[in-house]
Image (tube, rainbow, N blue to C red):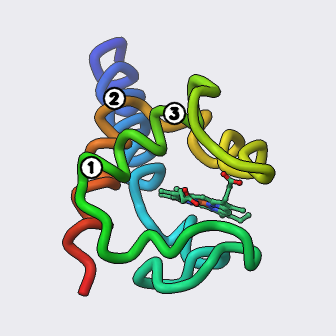
Amino acid sequence: MKKFLLTSVLAASTACSMWAASTAACAGCHGATFEKKALGKSAVVKGWDAAKVEKALVGYKDGSYGGAMKAVMKGQVARLSPADIKDLAKQIAAMK
Ligand code: HEC
């Protein structure tokens, strides 16, 4: 029984972090392929390389990056792990 519980907790948290690293959560503001200026304010992120996206997301998280609307992005990245951020940055850089 203990083993079963542990397995389900692990499975649930894996599913959770997969969800967190999906760009579906970003599409409403940035567009499905990050082709939009989010809320009319952000830079167009499409075309950025992974390192640049990662730097921005890590910066929003620790407060070292951003413009007038950075509080919006801080909320978006707060629950992402460093691995999630790397993963997202790769996905975004690969968008055509
Ligand atoms: C509620 C709308 C909203 C959502 C959802 C959102 N963003 Fe943003 N994003 C913004 C805004 C507004 C800015 C500009 C913030 C600022 O002033 O620095 C921004 C900026 C950015 C930037 C830097 C662009 C720049 O202007 O320097 C990146 C990269 C980014 N977002 C990625 C993401 C990712 C990845 C997600 C999903 C996990 C996401 N955003 C979800 C609104 C949003």
Q: Is residue 19 left or right of residue 3?
A: right
Q: Secondary structure at mark 3?
A: helix
Crowding around mark 2 (Cα neighbors within 10 Å: few <14, some 14 to 19, many 20+) is few
Give above or below for 71 relative to 21.
above
Where 50 sits versus 11, above or below? below
Q: Gap between marks 1 and 2, in whole Å?
A: 20 Å
> Hey, what amino acid is under mark 3?
Gly
User: Where residue 86 sits: x, y (%)?
Assistant: 28, 43
Of the residues under marks 3 and 1, which one precedes in the sequence? 3
Residue closer to the observer: 3 or 71: 71
Tell me the distance, in whole angstroms, between the alpha carbons under discs 3 and 2: 29 Å
Q: Determine whether the residue tagged by mark 2 lies in a helix, strand or loop.
A: helix
Label ID, residue 59: 3
Q: Is the residue marked by circle 3 packed among few (<14), some (14-19), or many (20+) residues within 10 Å?
A: some
Give, as a three-letter code, the residue at label 2.
Leu
- At x 34%, y 54%, the residue is 88
How crowded pointer 1 is (Cα within 10 Å; few <14, some 14-19, many 20+) is rated as some
Rendering quarter of residue 77: top right
The residue indicated by pointer 1 is 87
Instruction: Mark 1 or mark 2: name the one nearer the start of the chain.
Output: 2
Which of marks 2 and 3 precedes in the sequence? 2
- Circle 1 sits in a helix, a strand or a loop, which is it? helix
**Circle on res. 10:** 2
Residue in the foreground of this view, choosing between 31 and 84: 31
Q: Tell me: 68 left or right of 4.
A: right
